[in-house]
Image (spheres, rainbow, N blue to C red):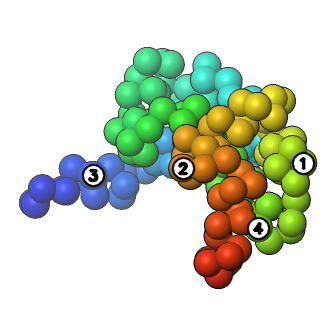
Amino acid sequence: MGEQSEAVRQIATSGSNMQRIAAVLTRIKTDFTEPLRIEELARQAKMSPASFHHHFKQVTSMSPLQYQKQLRLLEARRLMMVEKSTAANAADRVGYESPSQFSREYARMFGAPPIKDIDRLLSTGQVN
């Protein structure tokens, strides 16, 4: 009955838009290194591309491409910190074709280029 009642109803309803988006989110998390095909994801969610985009953004507060980018960058950061991967190797492993694009997007998300960010995290002991 409260402010979130519709969201709770959507989660509990089998085949609801929210459940179909959740299934797509699981797929994106599993295949985040692969190129996104919005039409294919929309088809999986049984929605038009426009409706899919709208519902996806409603659930995640970001577009499917932004969501994938965030997953890729977080995994690349983990690879560099935990596995001591180079930025170029991490970028390649998470699906980036262009190291310069990776570096730009990484700096945009974390506030510093990969090497500076990792050095800062390691020097402050923020390794998980």
Disc on the earlier residue, 1 or 2 = 1
- Amino acid of disc 2: Gly
Q: Mark 1 points at which residue?
A: 89
Question: Which residue is the extreme one toward the bottom?
Answer: 125
- Asked if labels 2 and 3 touch by Cβ distance under 8 angstroms, the answer is no
Q: Is residue 80 placed above or below 15 in the rendered structure?
A: below
Q: Which of marks 4 and 2 is in front?
A: 2
Q: In the rendered image, which quarter is residue 120 located in?
A: bottom right
How far apart are the two marked residues, 3 and 1, measured between alpha carbons? Answer: 40 Å
Foreground of the two, 108 or 29:
108
Residue 111 position in % (x across, y down): 54, 50
Disc on the earlier residue, 4 or 3 = 3
How far apart are the two marked residues, 3 and 2, measured between alpha carbons? Answer: 33 Å
- Amino acid of disc 3: Ala
How crowded is the residue under tag 1: few (<14 C-alpha within 10 Å), some, or many (20+)?
Answer: some
Disc on the earlier residue, 4 or 2 = 4
Residue 119 position in % (x across, y down): 72, 65
Q: Name the residue under label 2.
A: 111
Tag count: 4
Disc on the earlier residue, 4 or 1 = 4
Q: Nearer the viewer, mark 3 or mark 1?
A: 1
Residue at the location (18% across, 56% down)?
A: 5
Q: Is mark 4 on a helix, strand or loop?
A: helix
Q: What element carries label 2?
A: loop
- Amino acid of disc 1: Asn
How crowded is the residue under tag 2: few (<14 C-alpha within 10 Å), some, or many (20+)?
Answer: few
Q: Nearer the viewer, mark 3 or mark 2?
A: 2
Label for residue 7? Answer: 3
